[in-house]
Amino acid sequence: MFDNLSERLNRTFKSLRGQGRLSDDNIAQSLREVRMALLEADVALPVVKLFIEQVRQRAVGQEVSTSLTPGQALVKIVQSELVLLMGEVNESLDLRAQPPAVIMMAGLQGAGKTTSVAKLAHLLQQRETKKVMVASADIYRPAAIEQLRILADEVGASFFSSDASQRPVDIAKSALQQARKQFVDVLILDTAGRLHVDEEMMGEIRELHATVEPVETLFVVDSMTGQDAANSARAFDQALPLTGVVLTKTDGDARGGAALSVRQITGKPIKFLGVGEKVGDLEPFHPDRIASRILGMGDTLTLIEDLERKVDKKKADKLAKKVRKGKGFDLADFRDQLQQMQGIGGIASMMDKLPGVANLPDKVKGQVNDREFVRMEAMINSMTPKERRRPDLIKGSRKRRITKGSGTTVQDLNRLLKQFKQMQKMMKKMKGGKMARMMSGMGGGMPGGGMPGGGRMPF
């Protein structure tokens, strides 16, 4: 998300380097570039105009401190205004109500409401230890109820069984009664997709809202619709008292116009971002962290939270003890590391949160992709247990067998073995607790100082 916008903004700020102060001329030129970058990101025009004017008022004539270049000074101003534009702080769900607290999901068809219901149930159970029930009042879409049942089973949430022959209001009433009987903390109600111009359907969802009196009414919208996402949210807010917005499919949106437009146009906070297809791919929306990502500064706080939440600590401790005892680091351990990385969203997700990645050459960024990690894991899976323990055995005929079994080439396997040896050396340096030497050898990059494809992270 924000790839195109980040690239344009970084080019703009670089052009200011070497100038002594922010003047009317260099500010005007830079803000023209920022304006074009925002419009290309499909940010709503009124939002762009207001944003540019606020940045201009703060930037013109500002003295640049001895430690800052004009580009850095402007970045600081733009970052501050981006945070203000998106809402300043994360606004979490307000579940302070007599259980069950009801969350109602509304939105257009195909926005990802049902999947978002399951993701939100998973998040509330994992992070807030809530007992969650989900129910579907979508009687119009074929298999919508069955889809939610399958997803509820996947995330371990209670599922209220409904039927397409029932009225949505009756489903909602019965689900609420059942949630009370089962002492559920949160009931999440999925609703049918509808257009704000369909008065009959909007009347139905207003009746649903009056029936269950939700503490949170979230509008779910596809981020790839750009500024239309904000306009749709505004139209729905006129019919329903929305409390927040869930932006879905942000992993497929390189522009980010919706995230920058929604708060300003609707006055409603973005509460969550859908960042992938898995049930764990829902992130709370933090305006300050998103602003840092847009400006290529990374998002280390979210990365740390991901690591703490998703990394298998037992496996990590087991590997650490093994290395400290000098038992060696083998290809089975290397495969575990690859799987752990996939579990926290893959290398692409990690890189998006690392500071400085936006400044890497496209050639280097292009060498880092999760497909390469999948190929590496496939090659290791095609080895025998003995080969994983003793990679030095992998010669001629063994190489041909492994590459044939994994659908790769001998060159791919040679590259894997080279990277493994680099990582093995790092682990040997850890044996005596010589962390400083290990970090020096890593070159501030990934284990082994390199990446799939032979790239290097020059941080």
Image: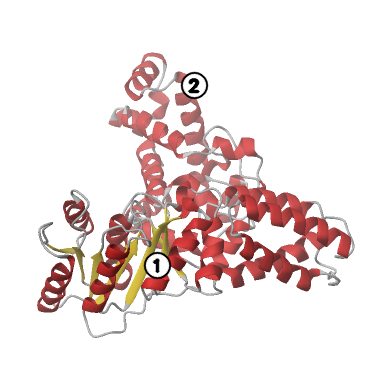
Which three-letter amino acid code belongs to the residue tagged 1? Phe
Disc assigned to residue 425: none
Q: Residues within 10 Å of mark 1 (few under 14, many from 20)?
A: many
Residue 123 pos. (x, y %): 32, 65
Image quadrant in which you'd find residue 65: bottom right
Which three-letter amino acid code belongs to the residue tagged 2? Gln
Tell me the SS state at disc 2: helix
Front residue of 399 and 13? 13
Image quadrant in which you'd find residue 332: top left
Q: Earlier in the sequence, mark 2 or mark 1?
A: 1
Front residue of 161 and 96? 161
Rendered residue at 41%/50% (across/down): 345
Relative to 393, 182 lies left or right: left
Front residue of 388 and 116? 116
Disc assigned to residue 411: 2
Q: Can you identify the residue that label 1 sits on? A: 236
Relative to 22, 387 lies left or right: left
Q: Is residue 430 above or below residue 418?
A: below
Residue 84 pos. (x, y %): 60, 73
Residue 3 pos. (x, y %): 58, 48
Q: Residues within 10 Å of mark 2 (few under 14, many from 20)?
A: few
Q: Residue 459: tell me if it is visible.
A: no
Distance between the Cα atoms at labels 2 and 1? 55 Å
Residue 420 pos. (x, y %): 47, 35
Rendered residue at 52%/45% (across/down): 447
Tell me the SS state at disc 1: helix
Rendered residue at 37%/50% (across/down): 343
